[in-house]
Structures are given as structure tokens and as C-alpha cells.
């Protein structure tokens, strides 16, 4: 058996061991009316070891675009350390900025893909605006966790390979009133077990923002 084969076998054994100490976790989000809540930002906060829920930043292309005079997506959730591209796919120029404590920045008036990615190194909520179009509002939530995402149309977020341990589920949405996040009672992730947890949001929610409709041929 060659050295390379032994090394590959050793890596496979390590990965198998790590997987045996992890589990798949499904979070089901629902509102006060017990109906599914789509588009909810959800993440797991470890109560054991912060590093267990804050691993290396996934190398994926995080993108917050501008389409039809809106930020797209309206809400983007990323891990700490993510670099986000801000292309402008509109035919009109935009000037993106944020005054949020988690990230303050400003991109001068532009179209297309003029700027390099912006680094988001602090956890928390970043509210985006456009200096030219006041109705444009977007959100980036920087989660201090590697186990995060948004609930789908059925209010479900599926997380894979979550290390065994004690966690709380946290949530955020622009529809929340007052509090920045809601938490579910502490949950325990057991190695190898597929688990389902329900996050019931008890407080009333703001209505969803209507999508802006702009007349064709409008120039800025």
C-alpha cells in the first residue's frame, strides 16, 4: 500500500469519525397563527464551544444584486468573514451604503460590477440603502455560526453535519417588532440522530413589504 493510499485512507477515517459525531437538524419556523414562516434567518448558537458553531467561512460566491430597483435578495445571511459582491444588474445607477455598526461602507454611484467584494468581519445586522433611491432597502445578517440559512417556502431549514452538543436556535426577520432575535429553548444535538425542532414565533409580525413597481422608461 502506497503512502498516498495510506494518507487517503487516514483522511477517510477521520471524516467518517467526524460524521459519526454529528447529526442532521431540521428547523421548522412558524408564526403566531402556526403557519409556516418563509424567509426567516435562522442559525444555531453553540452553548458548549463557540468554535463548534463558527468554523471556517464557506468559500461560496455571496452576492447581493440590484434588480428592478430592489436589492436581490431582500435578505442575505452570511457567516462572519464572508466577502459579498454588490453587482448592479439594473439599467440605472445605484449608490449602495450602510451605516450599521456591524459594517459601515459606501459604494459610489455605479452600474455593472465596478467594485471588489466587501468584507463582513463582524456579526450582526447590516441594513443597506441606496443614496439615489430611498425606497430601496436590503438586509445582510452576519451570523456568528457555520450552521445558518433561511427558511424555505414551507418554513423549513435543513442543516447537515451539526456537531453533537448544546445549542439555541436564533432567528431574525425584518418583520420582527422590537427584538432583534428570538430564541428557542436550548436544544441538544445527539450524534447520528436526525432531529426536527419547531421554532414558534409568538410575537406579532409586521406585514410583508409590497414589491415596488416602477413604470417602464423611468430614468434616474
Image (tube, rainbow, N blue to C red):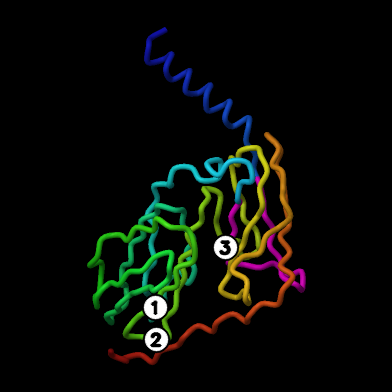
User: Is 162 on the left-hand or right-hand side of 119?
Assistant: right
Mark 3, residues whose alpha carbon is within 10 Å: few (<14), some, or many (≥20)? many
Q: Earlier in the sequence, mark 1 or mark 2?
A: 1
Which element carries disc 3, helix, strand or loop?
strand
Q: Residue tagged by mark 1?
A: 129
Separation of residues labelled 1 and 2 (CA atoms):
7 Å
Q: Which residues are drawn in magenta?
A: 25-44
Marks 2 and 3 sit apart, C-alpha to C-alpha, by 24 Å
Q: Is residue 58 above or below residue 184?
A: above
Mark 1 and mark 2 residues within 8 Å of each other at the beta carbon = yes
Q: Is residue 217 left or right of residue 6?
A: left
Spatial CA span between label 3 and label 1: 20 Å
Say which residue label 2 marks: 134
Residue placed at 41% from the left, 81% from the top?
136
Percent across and percent down for residue 30 are 71, 66
Left or right of 157: which side holds 211? left
Looking at the rendered image, the quarter that the N terminus falls into is: top left
Name the residue carrying label 3. 41
**Label whose residue precedes the other's in the sequence (3 or 1):** 3
Q: At numbered mark 1, what does the secondary structure look like: helix, strand or loop?
A: strand
Amino acid at each position: 500500500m502506497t503512502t498516498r493510499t495510506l494518507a487517503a485512507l487516514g483522511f477517510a477515517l477521520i471524516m467518517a469519525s467526524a460524521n459519526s459525531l454529528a447529526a442532521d437538524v431540521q428547523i421548522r419556523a412558524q408564526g403566531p397563527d402556526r403557519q409556516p414562516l418563509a424567509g426567516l434567518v435562522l442559525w444555531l448558537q453553540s452553548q458548549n464551544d463557540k468554535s463548534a458553531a463558527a468554523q471556517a467561512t464557506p468559500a461560496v460566491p455571496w452576492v447581493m444584486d440590484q434588480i428592478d430597483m430592489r436589492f436581490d435578495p431582500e435578505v442575505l445571511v452570511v457567516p462572519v468573514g464572508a466577502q459579498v459582491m454588490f453587482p448592479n444588474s439594473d439599467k440605472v445607477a445605484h449608490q449602495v451604503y450602510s451605516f450599521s455598526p456591524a459594517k459601515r461602507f459606501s459604494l459610489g454611484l455605479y452600474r455593472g460590477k465596478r467594485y471588489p467584494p466587501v468584507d463582513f468581519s463582524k456579526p450582526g445586522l447590516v441594513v443597506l440603502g441606496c443614496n439615489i433611491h430611498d425606497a430601496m432597502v436590503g438586509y445582510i445578517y452576519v451570523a456568528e455560526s457555520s450552521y445558518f440559512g433561511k427558511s424555505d417556502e414551507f418554513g423549513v431549514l435543513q442543516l447537515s453535519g451539526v456537531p453533537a452538543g448544546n445549542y439555541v436556535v436564533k432567528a431574525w426577520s425584518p418583520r420582527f417588532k422590537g427584538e432583534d432575535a428570538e430564541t428557542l429553548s436550548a436544544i441538544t444535538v445527539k450524534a447520528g440522530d436526525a432531529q426536527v425542532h419547531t421554532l414558534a414565533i409568538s410575537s406579532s409580525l409586521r406585514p410583508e413589504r409590497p414589491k415596488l413597481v416602477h413604470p417602464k422608461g423611468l430614468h434616474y
